[in-house]
Amino acid sequence: MKINKETQEKIDRLQLIEQNLQSILIQKQTFQGQLLEIENALKELTNKKDVYKIIGAIMVASKKEDLEKELNQKKEILDLRLKNIEKQEEKIKEGATELQSEVMKNLKE
């Protein structure tokens, strides 16, 4: 089967899109892991009187309210990043589906 130049370019673009999607999925997974850690830390804080914060290689005592505020801010940032990543993922998937349809149509001709 002979593939014309335009179809081959679309296939190449589709492969790049798939690589981008994989990269985005890895980022999404990383953010989800960080978000889970923060949520678990916040749950633990509700039961504790004395709290500590890790700074570099040491652990220092911290005010519970300050630590909760900091963790909630980080959580908000991660939520925004996740929403952004999910929007990018959706756009890439839509583009890939459209391009894949074009390639399949060209290959059938």
Image (cartoon, helix red, strand yellow):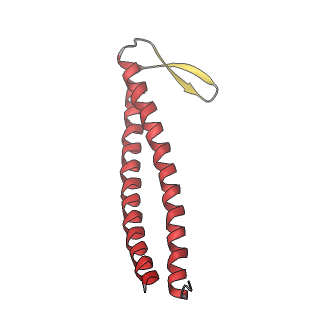
Residue 25: where, in percent of width, then height?
48, 52
Which image quarter: residue 70? top left
Is residue 1 placed above or below 67 in the rendered structure? Answer: below
Counting every numbered tag in the picture gives 0
Which image quarter: residue 60? top right
Residue 51: where, in percent of width, then height?
46, 17
Is residue 62 placed above or below 25 in the rendered structure? Answer: above
Between residues 35 and 22, which one lies in front from this camera angle? 22
User: In the current view of this chain or complex, which residue is farthest to the front?
Assistant: 1
Residue at the spot 52% in from the left edge and 74% down from the top edge = 13
Residue 89: where, in percent of width, then height?
41, 58
Residue at the spot 50% in from the left edge and 63% down from the top edge = 18
Between residues 53 and 43, which one lies in front from this camera angle? 43
Is residue 109 placed above or below 61 in the rendered structure? Answer: below
Q: Quadrant of the N terminus?
A: bottom right
Taking the image as shown, residue 79 lies to the left or right of residue 53, namely left
Is residue 29 placed above or below 68 in the rendered structure? Answer: below
Residue at the spot 54% in from the left edge and 81% down from the top edge = 9
Between residues 51 and 9, which one lies in front from this camera angle? 9
Which image quarter: residue 97? bottom left
User: In the current view of this chain or complex, which residue is farthest to the top?
Assistant: 49
Residue at the spot 38% in from the left edge and 25% down from the top edge = 42
Residue 35: where, in percent of width, then height?
42, 37
Q: Quadrant of the C terminus?
A: bottom left
